[in-house]
């Protein structure tokens, strides 16, 4: 299980829209062999079909798809956007933190969501994630949050 390892965290990412943001978060998983290219498409399709249901809090999106859509290992990536992007969520737009969630079972899905919730329930952590200027700062936040 890879949870926000430094190889799957990027700060100051530039994207033009929500789909590019989903792609960028998914691409980190693909580059590390944690998911297949098909998983990125599945996440974008879920967004097109179901809307921004995964924009769970102000500034925070957690796009995901089903395990059978190409997840190799349970993992969560993070891209912090240089400029916020609108996903179409009435209350939580615009988004600056995009966590790409890949779970290979429903149990893993719950474990990863619990870890993320624990991190994001602390407003200080969210502010630090929003303000980070390099990947090392994210690592420090995670180590302090655990």
Image (cartoon, rainbow, N blue to C red):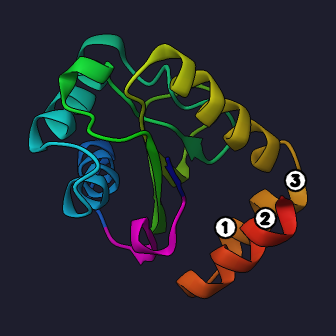
Cα–Cα span, label 2 and label 1: 5 Å
Q: CA distance from mark 2 to mark 3?
A: 6 Å
Which element is circle 1 on?
helix
| Horizontal and vertical percent position of residue 133 | 59, 86
Is residue 9 in the magenta section?
A: yes
The magenta segment: 4-14
Question: Where in the figure is residue 141, as x and y percent of width and height?
Answer: 76, 71
Q: Are marks 2 and 3 in contact (CB under 8 Å)?
A: yes
Query: Does the image show residue 100?
Result: no
- How far is disc 3 from disc 1 in space, using C-alphas? 11 Å
Residue annotated with mark 3: 123
State the mark number for residue 130. Answer: 1
Label 3, secondary structure: give it.
helix
Q: Name the residue: 33% across, 44% down.
A: 18
Q: Which mark is residue 69?
A: none
Q: For the view shown, which residue lies furthest in the left direction?
A: 38
Residue identified by numbered label 2: 127
Mark 1: few/some/many CA within 10 Å (<14, 14-19, 20+): some
111 sits left or right of 39 in the view: right
- Say whether residue 62 is visible: yes
* Above/below status of 111 relative to 142: above
Q: In the rendering, at what x and y percent does residue 57 appear?
A: 69, 35
**Does residue 51 show up magenta in the picture?**
no
Q: Earlier in the sequence, mark 3 or mark 1?
A: 3
Numbered label tally: 3
Asked whether disc 2 touches disc 1, contact meaning CB atoms under 8 Å apart, the reply is yes
Residue at image point 35% right, 41% down: 73
């Amino acid at each position: 299980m890879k949870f926000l390892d430094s190889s799957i965290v990027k700060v100051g990412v530039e994207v033009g829209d929500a789909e590019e943001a989903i792609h960028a978060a998914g691409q980190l998983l693909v580059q590390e062999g944690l998911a297949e290219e098909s998983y990125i498409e599945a996440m974008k399709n879920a967004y097109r079909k179901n809307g921004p249901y995964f924009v769970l809090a102000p500034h925070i999106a957690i796009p995901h798809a089903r395990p059978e859509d190409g997840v190799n290992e349970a993992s969560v990536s993070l891209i912090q956007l240089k400029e916020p992007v609108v996903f179409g969520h009435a209350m939580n737009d615009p988004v600056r933190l995009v966590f790409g969630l890949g779970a290979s079972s429903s149990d893993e899905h719950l474990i990863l969501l619990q870890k993320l919730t624990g991190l994001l329930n602390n407003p200080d952590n969210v502010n630090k994630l929003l303000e980070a200027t390099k990947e090392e700062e994210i690592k420090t936040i995670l180590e302090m949050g655990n």
